Image (cartoon, rainbow, N blue to C red):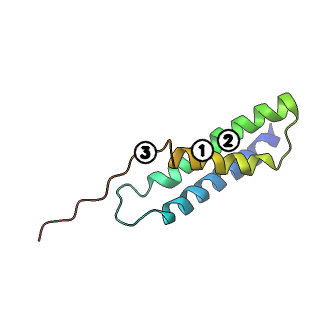
């Protein structure tokens, strides 16, 4: 059971970090900047679960986990992600 916690923690933290980096590539002025690391965290959890199933069924290598995390975060924040609208500018 302890073998699961460290890779899960590393995958979620790497997902949150990747989500934060993805936020830096967006144009400034968008609402909900906290959404990026949260979706990255959830993408890291989902990628860990996918890797865990693949490793137990087919014996997937350990280097596949970071690749899956980056792909999950890219999918969830990119093409399949939320549609963000620019923040409204206050009227002077």
Q: What residue is rendered at 51% in x and 49% in y?
A: 77
Number of marks: 3
Viewer-nearest of labels 3 and 2? 3
Lateral position of residue 80 relative to residue 28, left or right:
right
Q: Residue furthest top?
A: 57
Which residue is found at the position 58% from the left and 54% from the top? 16
Q: Which residue carries the number 1 mark?
A: 43
Location of residue 2 in the rendering, given as x and y in whole percent from the top left corner: 80, 41
15 shown above or below 59: below
Label 3 crowd bin: few (<14), some (14–19), many (20+), radius 10 Å: few
Find the residue positioned furthest to the bottom: 92
Per the image, label 1 sits on a secondary structure element best described as helix
| Whole-percent x, y for residue 38 in the image | 51, 49
Q: Is there CB contact under 8 Å for labels 1 and 2?
A: yes
* Label 3 – label 2 distance at C-alpha: 19 Å
Tell me how far mark 1 sits from mark 2, CA to CA.
6 Å
Q: Residues within 10 Å of mark 1 (few under 14, many from 20)?
A: many
Number of the label disc, if any, that sits on residue 47: 2
Q: What's the residue at 79%, 33% (across, down)?
A: 54
Mark 3 and mark 1: Cα distance apart in space? 14 Å
Q: Position of residue 87 (x, y in %)?
A: 28, 59
Residue at image mark 3: 82
* Residue at the spot 84% in from the left edge and 47% down from the top edge: 62
């Amino acid at each position: 059971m302890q073998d699961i916690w460290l890779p899960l923690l590393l995958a979620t933290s790497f997902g949150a970090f990747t989500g934060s980096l993805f936020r830096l590539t967006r144009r400034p002025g968008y609402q909900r900047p906290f959404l990026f690391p949260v979706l990255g965290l959830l993408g890291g959890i989902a990628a860990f679960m996918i890797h865990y199933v693949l490793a137990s069924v087919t014996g997937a290598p350990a280097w596949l986990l970071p690749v899956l995390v980056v792909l999950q975060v890219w999918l969830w924040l990119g093409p399949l992600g939320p549609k963000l609208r620019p923040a409204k500018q206050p009227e002077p």
